[in-house]
């Protein structure tokens, strides 16, 4: 029998040179096969075809780099890193993708790129019309040399450059003097005035450092006090402004999604009520009124408009703001961050809040993660320590001092003490163990019987080709009832809770609009008490399989119409929760917004009852937006939600369903983000062997970018 050989289109006369690197047609044919298989997006192929058509003399290696740079954008990377791609092509490119059955696959990237060196690939990235190293009009930008070469699509290279330049300019601004801040900080943080405090109060230090600089980042895990700190920061800034000029600063608060904006709005309102301002020179009530509580989405802040990507506010029409605070900054992609910085006046302050250890934005870039790469170690200069000593009366430990610290390091503070999860919290201990990359400790925490933590194992190694006995009803009971008996500290709820509120609190058909809005708010609030999260979209343990299963389980239990017990596909029914998957500016709905389908009478004809989808307003108000289902183009049922889509949300009880086998998508950041969506109870559902979680804990997300802010 003759040995297996590569397909003809892959091999040229020189067996070390794949034909795709010698011939445009062979390359485009390969890319077309990858598109047909779902490995590349159609836009990646079309982009490469356009370049080949416009510049027939372009090297196929250059065209391959263009196709893969476009592909990487779709996966969240800003650029294609040649060396990383060649070291482990399939892993670096995440090919084959999630859900591929691996049957009769096209040639893998590892096969196509085998034998290619980064030096040879980099040498081919030259064409006067297609490639430039820096500013220009070419569609591609190349940065670095040899093994360190990165390939960008120009627009995203420009976004990265703009972000870097804006931040560097703010880091060069003269810092505030320390002495005037001491009395204000003592009043805002009365419990930590003494310099003899064994460990520094990181909230106090973060407040001081954010006041010192025109650009600041405050990062920390759940419950570390990011909102508390920023409210006190705003009190500090407004107190100084009122004392010096008699006029308050124009302060705006924003978040990436409507859900995150609503949550921050409620949190800030609660903090303002408790905030002690009597020790400050300014009148407490005037000062309290000068601190805003209304939070808007970034798209609303920037003035997004229907049917166009152009924003109302930009460099030519900047935002009328002196201080801007952005929460959940880990969700902000590079394009949105660049637009935000372009629209920010040069003398305005920018404060970013977020958890650096969460998943990065769904779209390209990991801006917060890039900015916080060195946050754990502090890396503060001795001059910064002396400034903080004068401003706060607290001395930074030597462990956080670094003579080579950058300007960015001086503007980043990591909050290190969780006030939500105490020492006995299983959720807190599990989050710490996972974030530290310790699978053995994570497993031990799961076995210790914590009151707020439950493990549901559905794995049965005795079943062939399956990790779950189809007759096992525990997952269904979890979805419906919440399996509250698994917890010793309270009655964790399932989806039956919000459906009972929907049924029992429904107004009479003759009720006023205010009553219908109040009912919708109650149902939406109850829905937020429980959420099932998963890592994947496809398959039994992805949202596609789980949403169908949960819908049927709720129907069999009597909570949804009985006909749904055997229904296939997406149907509209009262109680259906839906997730918006794409911004709809005409309806004012943003990607990530959640609505509940409710049956209510027509406003002008109470006898006519029809389905409407109720969404909470994204402006922090209690207003309800009612939308006809027919007008919703990009929504999906959300009994199960991917962890990516859950960012910016929190739920009283969260159930995280792990897939039955290891998957490249399953990473430390994803697990950490999923479990920290839980406020009171967490159920971890394992559908496969223990190694699935163990491997995920040791596998990290690495987004490729070049956003490194240099010291000015």
Image: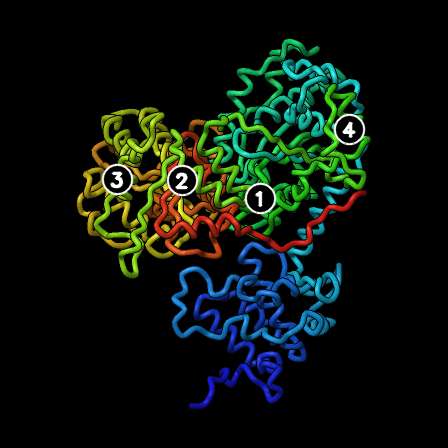
Q: Which residue is drawn at 39% across and 48% down?
A: 658
Q: Which of 609 and 521 is in front in this view?
A: 521
- Nearer to the camera, 151 or 377: 377
Visible in this render: residue 625?
A: no
Residue position marked by numbered label 1 in the rendering: 332
Question: Marks 1 and 3, how far apart in space?
Answer: 36 Å
The residue under label 3 is 477
- Which circle's residue, 4 or 1, is located before the other in the chain? 1
Compared with 632, 6 (above or below) is below
Residue highlighted by disc 2 = 594
Element under disc 2: strand
Labels 1 and 2 touching (C-beta < 8 A): no
Name the side, left or right, on which 650 lies relative to 58: left
Q: State which mark lies toward you, 4 or 1.
A: 4
Residue 691 vs 436, above or below: the answer is below
Which residue sits at x=58%, y=44%?
Answer: 332
The residues tagged by marks 4 and 1 sit, at their Cα atoms, a distance apart of 31 Å
> In terms of sequence position, does the residue under pointer 1 or pointer 3 come before the other?
1
Horizontal side of residue 234 vs 675, given as left or right: right
Residue at x-position 65% and y-position 57%:
155
């Amino acid at each position: 029998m003759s040995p297996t050989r590569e397909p003809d289109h892959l091999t040229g006369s020189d067996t070390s040179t794949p034909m795709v690197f010698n011939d445009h047609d062979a390359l485009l044919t390969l890319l077309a096969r990858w598109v047909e298989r779902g490995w590349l997006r159609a836009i990646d192929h079309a982009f490469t075809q356009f370049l080949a058509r416009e510049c027939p003399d372009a090297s196929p290696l250059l065209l391959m780099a263009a196709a893969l740079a476009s592909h990487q954008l779709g996966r969240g990377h800003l650029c294609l890193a040649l060396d990383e791609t060649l070291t482990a092509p399939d892993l670096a490119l995440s090919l084959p993708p999630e859900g591929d059955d691996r049957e009769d696959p096209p040639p893998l990237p590892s096969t196509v790129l085998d034998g290619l060196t980064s030096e040879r690939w980099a040498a081919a990235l030259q064409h006067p019309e297609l490639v430039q190293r820096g500013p220009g009009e070419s569609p591609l930008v190349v940065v670095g040399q040899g093994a360190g070469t990165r390939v960008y699509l120009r627009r995203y290279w420009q976004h990265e450059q703009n972000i870097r330049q804006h931040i560097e300019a703010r880091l060069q601004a003269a810092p505030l003097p320390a002495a005037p801040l001491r009395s204000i900080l003592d009043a805002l943080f009365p419990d930590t005035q003494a310099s003899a405090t064994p460990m520094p109060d990181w909230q106090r230090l973060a407040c001081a450092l954010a006041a010192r600089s025109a650009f600041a980042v405050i990062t920390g895990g759940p419950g570390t006090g990011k909102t508390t700190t920023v409210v006190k920061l705003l009190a500090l800034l407004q107190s100084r402004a009122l004392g010096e000029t008699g006029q308050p600063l124009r302060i705006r608060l924003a978040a990436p999604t409507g859900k995150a904006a609503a949550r921050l709005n409620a949190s800030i309102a609660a903090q303002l009520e408790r905030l002690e301002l009597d020790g400050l020179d300014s009148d407490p009530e005037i000062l309290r009124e000068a601190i805003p509580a209304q939070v808007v989405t970034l798209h609303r802040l920037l003035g997004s408009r229907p049917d166009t990507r152009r924003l109302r506010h930009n460099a030519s029409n900047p935002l009328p703001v002196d201080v801007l605070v952005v929460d959940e900054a880990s969700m902000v992609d590079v394009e949105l961050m660049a637009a935000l910085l372009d629209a920010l006046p040069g003398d305005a302050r920018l404060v970013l809040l977020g958890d650096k250890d969460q998943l990065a934005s769904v779209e390209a870039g990991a801006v917060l993660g890039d900015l916080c790469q060195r946050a754990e170690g502090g890396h503060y200069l001795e001059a910064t320590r002396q400034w903080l000593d004068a401003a706060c009366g607290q001395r930074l430990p030597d462990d956080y001092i670094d003579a080579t610290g950058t300007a960015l390091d001086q503007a980043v503070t990591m909050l290190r003490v969780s006030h939500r999860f105490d020492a006995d919290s299983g959720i807190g201990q599990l989050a710490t163990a996972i974030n530290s990359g310790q699978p053995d400790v994570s497993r031990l925490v799961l076995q210790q019987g914590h009151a707020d933590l439950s493990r549901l194992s559905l794995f049965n190694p005795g079943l062939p080709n399956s990790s779950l006995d189809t007759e096992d009803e525990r997952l269904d009971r979890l979805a419906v009832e919440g399996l509250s008996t698994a917890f010793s500290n309270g009655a964790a709820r399932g989806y039956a809770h919000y459906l009972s509120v929907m049924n029992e609190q429904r107004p009479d058909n003759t009720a006023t609009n205010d009553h219908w809005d109040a009912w919708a708010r109650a149902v939406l609030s109850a829905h937020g008490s429980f959420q099932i999260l998963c890592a994947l979209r496809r398959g039994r343990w992805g949202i596609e399989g789980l949403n169908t299963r949960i819908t049927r389980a709720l129907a069999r239990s009597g909570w949804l119409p009985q006909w749904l017990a055997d229904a296939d596909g997406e149907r509209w029914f009262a109680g259906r929760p839906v997730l918006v998957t794409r911004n709809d500016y005409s309806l004012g709905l943003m990607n990530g917004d959640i609505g509940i389908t409710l049956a209510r009478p027509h406003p002008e004809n109470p006898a006519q009852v029809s389905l409407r989808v109720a969404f909470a307003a994204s402006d922090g108000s209690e207003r309800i937006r009612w939308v006809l289902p027919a007008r919703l183009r990009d929504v999906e049922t959300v009994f199960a939600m991917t962890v990516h889509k859950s960012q910016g949300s929190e739920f009283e009880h969260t159930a995280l369903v792990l897939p039955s086998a290891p998957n490249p998508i399953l990473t430390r950041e994803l697990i950490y983000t999923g479990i920290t969506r839980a406020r009171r109870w967490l159920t971890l559902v394992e559908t496969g062997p223990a190694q699935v979680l163990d491997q995920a804990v040791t596998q990290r997300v690495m987004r490729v970018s070049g956003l490194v802010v240099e010291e000015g």
